């Protein structure tokens, strides 16, 4: 009998910032503060490291492109890069003026969006090297980014949330790029978001993830809470939004210890979602029925990132110190990537009580 969970070999040597399964295979990208991106082939106990890609600075996010022959990175070198897997060739698509925190690739529009601490989004058209990226200014520093089939959600400081319609974003950015010459500083687009919202969470947003059915999104905060919201602006739909407490543990002294919820990921088939916290736990939730489906055995350190495979049969869990204990050193052997093979119905919702 095969074990439902296994650890990937050759783990990063510093904290993990992001993990991403390929859309249609079991290839897995792992971005790390050790200035490397790791490409794995996941195959149970035969899983192995395919290749490592080196960068000038810590890598903060990674995203797959139009196919599984290329991916994108961003990080503390301020650059957004396209990487060709077979040749390892790196192409700089744009440069921000501060660290770049998040990436989102929208396959239906074939655009790549980067969000930087310089309070801007860059809209790239990777298939057209002559197309100058468009800049959109944000009111606050972005913390997380996620795309659904038709929407882009940007979670920022000051509890600000912008939701963009991807079709309009792509069309207007393409028109803007057509009138902008390469090297020009005037590539900025004044674009009003489809919706402006205030986060349901009172504390700093750590992660945001869109529902695969294009109906809404979940967000999480440093204060052990997750919020679930819907895109439909009608009063009925907005009345459905809610937030709940999670990833909290009671200390031996009876004190409620609250951990950040670092990671969120939606199951591509069932529409349920996983959360990962600084407490080392991963939980599965039915966001519609407002129920926890299950919680897995505690991992050896803080959960940094989560990713479901495209077919929903595997869940990758990145584990590394989150410094919740006040220690700032990353010890040897504490950074790990686990992959859990999900049983039939393991991530399926239970329905309302």
Image (cartoon, helix red, strand yellow):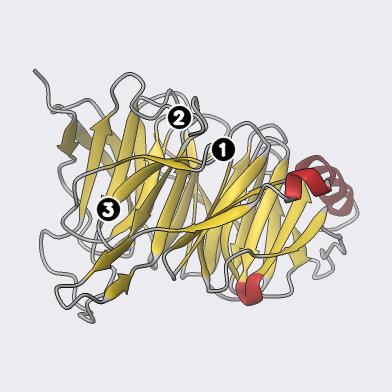
Farthest front residue in view: 353
Gap in Å between the C-alphas at discs 2 and 3? 19 Å
What residue is rendered at 33% in x and 36% in y?
315
Gap in Å between the C-alphas at discs 2 and 1? 9 Å
Query: Dot 3, how many residues are within 10 Å of its Cα: few (below 14), some (14-19), or many (20+)?
Result: many
Q: Can residue 148 be seen at all in this image of the molecule?
A: yes
Image quarter of residue 144: bottom right
Percent position (x, y) of residue 251?
A: 19, 72
Percent position (x, y) of residue 68?
A: 46, 30
Disc 3 versus disc 1: nearer the observer = 1
Identify the residue position indicated by label 2 in the image: 349
Gap in Å between the C-alphas at discs 3 and 1? 21 Å
Left or right for 176, reference 230: right
What residue is rendered at 73% in x and 38% in y?
150
Percent position (x, y) of residue 22?
A: 43, 33
Query: Dot 1, how many residues are within 10 Å of its Cα: few (below 14), some (14-19), or many (20+)?
Result: some
Percent position (x, y) of residue 219?
A: 55, 56
SS type, badge 1? loop
Image quarter of residue 26: top left
Identify the residue position indicated by label 3 in the image: 281
Q: Earlier in the sequence, mark 2 or mark 1?
A: 1
Q: Quick check: marks 2 and 1 in contact, CB under 8 Å?
A: yes
Identify the residue position indicated by label 1 in the image: 288
């Amino acid at each position: 009998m095969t074990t439902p969970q296994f650890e990937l070999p050759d783990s990063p040597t510093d904290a993990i910032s992001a993990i991403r399964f390929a859309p249609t295979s079991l290839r897995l990208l792992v971005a790390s503060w050790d200035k490397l991106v790791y490409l794995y082939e996941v195959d149970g106990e035969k899983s192995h490291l395919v290749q490592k890609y080196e960068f000038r600075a810590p890598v903060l996010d990674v995203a797959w492109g139009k196919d599984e022959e290329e991916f994108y990175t961003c990080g503390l070198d301020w650059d957004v890069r396209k990487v060709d897997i077979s040749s390892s060739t790196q192409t700089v698509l744009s440069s921000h003026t501060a660290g770049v925190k998040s990436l989102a690739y929208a396959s239906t529009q074939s655009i790549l969006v980067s969000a930087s601490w310089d309070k801007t989004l860059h809209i790239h058209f990777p298939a057209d090297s002559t197309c100058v990226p468009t800049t959109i200014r944000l009111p606050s520093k972005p913390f997380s980014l996620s795309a659904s089939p038709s929407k882009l959600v940007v979670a920022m400081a000051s509890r600000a949330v912008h939701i963009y319609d991807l079709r309009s974003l792509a069309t207007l950015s393409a028109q803007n790029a057509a009138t902008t010459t390469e090297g020009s500083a005037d590539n900025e687009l004044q674009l009003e978001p489809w919706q402006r919202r205030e986060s349901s969470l009172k504390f700093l947003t750590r992660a945001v993830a869109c529902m695969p059915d294009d109906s809404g999104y979940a967000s999480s905060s440093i204060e052990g809470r997750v919020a679930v919201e819907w895109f439909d602006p009608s009063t009925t739909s907005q009345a459905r939004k809610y937030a709940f407490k999670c990833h909290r543990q009671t200390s031996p002294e009876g004190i409620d210890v609250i951990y950040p919820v670092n990671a969120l990921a939606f199951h591509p088939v069932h529409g349920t979602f996983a959360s990962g916290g600084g407490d080392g736990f991963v939980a599965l939730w039915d966001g519609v029925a407002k129920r926890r489906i299950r919680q897995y055995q505690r991992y050896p350190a803080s959960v940094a990132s989560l990713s479901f495979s495209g077919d929903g049969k595997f869940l990758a869990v990145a584990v590394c110190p989150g410094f919740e204990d006040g220690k700032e050193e990353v010890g040897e052997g504490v950074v790990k990537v686990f992959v859990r093979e999900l049983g039939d119905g393991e991530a399926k919702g239970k329905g309302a009580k």
